[in-house]
Amino acid sequence: MNDGMTAHLLRVTPQELFTYLEDSVQLAGRVRSAAKDEWRYDIDKSWDGIIYLLTGQNSSSGHPLAKLFFSEQLIDKDQDLGTGPAHYLLPAQVQELHAALGGIQPGALKERFDAAAMTAAGVYPGNAWQEEGTDDYLAEYFELVQEVLATAAARGEALITFIQ
């Protein structure tokens, strides 16, 4: 897919989350660092497509599963990490989402893929869903999201999400 808004997931300890809530400049420094961060995952432009396949709606619908990427709990409402502020999930919320999404087979989501319906519903990035292989693209990134949730849930971690 072409350039555009990419979503990132960042696993953090509860203490790190508290630190970032107290001083969001530290989060910005971590996000903008060129250093490899093994706790950070880039899920490209799959975020809205994943929400659509899970819910039949785009991520702005208010569906509870859209909280996976847009929890409406903001690190700093005035901080822009690329395309707005970072959202976060507490460890208990990570556990809940892991329980809700952990058993879904990525292949089952592919069966819900409908490029025309996704484009009509305003699922970002629009006409890109017409490209061949985008159902596989979404299934692969959903599997990565499941892995991130499983790891964070097992370790009692929080999750920070942001769009760049």
Image (tube, rainbow, N blue to C red):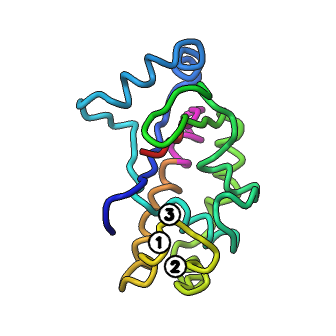
Which residue is depicted at the point 46% across and 63% down? 46
The answer to whether residue 75 is above or below residue 9 is above
* Figure quadrant of residue 130: bottom left
Earlier in the chain: of badge 2 and badge 3, it is: 2
> 125 and 146: which one is in front?
125
The CA span between labels 2 and 3 is 10 Å
Q: Which residue is mark 2?
A: 107
Please state if 109 lies on the left or on the right of 8 as rendered. right
The answer to whether residue 48 is above or below residue 134 is above
Mark 3: which amino acid? Phe
Please state if 17 lies on the left or on the right of 64 as rendered. left
Residue 148 position in % (x across, y down): 49, 48
Q: Are marks 2 and 1 in contact (CB under 8 Å)?
A: yes
Mark 1: which amino acid? Ala
Which residue is depicted at the point 33% across and 69% down? 1
The CA span between labels 3 and 1 is 5 Å
Whether residue 155 appears in magenta in the rendering, the answer is: yes
Residue 100 position in % (x across, y down): 70, 58
Q: Which residue is mark 1?
A: 139
Residue 42 position in % (x across, y down): 38, 50
Q: Which residues are magenta?
A: 149-159
Quick one: SS at disc 2? helix
Which residue is depicted at the point 41% across and 76% down? 128
Q: Which residue is mark 3?
A: 142
Quick one: SS at disc 3? helix
The CA span between labels 2 and 1 is 6 Å
Residue 33 position in % (x across, y down): 29, 28
Earlier in the chain: of badge 2 and badge 1, it is: 2
The answer to whether residue 98 is above or below residue 30 is below
The rendered magenta stretch, by its main secondary structure, is classed as helix
Mark 2: few/some/many CA within 10 Å (<14, 14-19, 20+): some
